Amino acid sequence: MEYFIDSASIGEIKEAASLGVLDGVTTNPSLVAKTGKPFAEVAKEICEFVNGPVSLEVVGTTAEDMVKEAKELRRFGSNVVVKIPMMSEGLKAVKRLSSEGIPTNVTLIFQPLQALLAAKAGASYVSPFIGRLDDIGQNGLDLVQDILTIFRQYHLKTKVLAASVRHPTHVLECAKMGAHVVTLPVKVIHQLTKHPLTDSGLKTFLEDWKKVQN
Ligand code: G3P
């Protein structure tokens, strides 16, 4: 399973990359807004620093605008994956972009048949939002499982990129299901490294080691 960071903060991205397990980055307009910096500055900085795929999202709402914007976004780097919202116009844009070899990530997926449509249009990734479904009393992990089942059934190559991940249990369940990618807030990346027994075990080892020094 690949680990992406869900952030537009270059500081967080560098911090996650320093762990040596980062495969890519996803952003969205809200995450860019949180940085307080102009979009172009943020996108340039991220694309230059990251070797793997970087999802940058379009804000146009017609296929024509999305395709035009996608080509502008690709100028930031050959690693740019164009993030397209799930909607009819988005599907048209994905079809056109995929026929030109431009990778896409269809976002805001909340039911499995949206994911199937995106895959049929040629999306490279689909992003089901786990946490936001949990928030309204539905099971976000069931959505990921349904999409994986459908994609396996039809041997679709589109990768399932689990998004809106809120805690390590989401990550564990995605790994058990065989999701291709999870995109994680920096907080969850740090949570994955931790266990209280690891901390107390290390504390004891270090205290005992001091006892045998001269
Ligand atoms: O980037 C899309 C997704 O991961 C957003 O997550 O936490 O805003 O629901 P969240």
Image: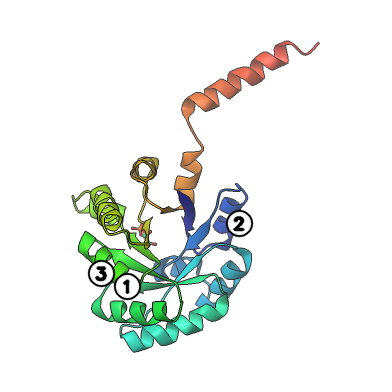
> Tag 3, which secondary structure?
helix
Q: Around disc 1, counting alpha carbons within 10 Å, would you say few (fewer than 14), some (14 to 19), or many (20 or more)?
A: many
Of badges 3 and 2, the one in the foreground is: 3
Q: CA distance from mark 3 to mark 2?
A: 35 Å
Q: CA distance from mark 1 to mark 3?
A: 12 Å
Residue identified by numbered label 1? 85
Q: Is residue 193 left or right of residue 162?
A: right
**Marks 3 and 2, the one that precedes in the sequence:** 2
Q: Which mark is residue 14?
A: 2
The image quadrant where one finds ligand 1 is bottom left
Of badges 1 and 2, the one in the foreground is: 1
Q: Which mark is residue 56?
A: none
> Tag 1, which secondary structure?
strand
Residue identified by numbered label 3? 117
Q: Quadrant of residue 65?
A: bottom left
The kind of residue tagged 1 is Pro
Q: Position of residue 1 (x, y in %)?
A: 45, 48
Q: Is residue 38 left or right of residue 58?
A: right
Q: Is residue 71 left or right of residue 149?
A: right
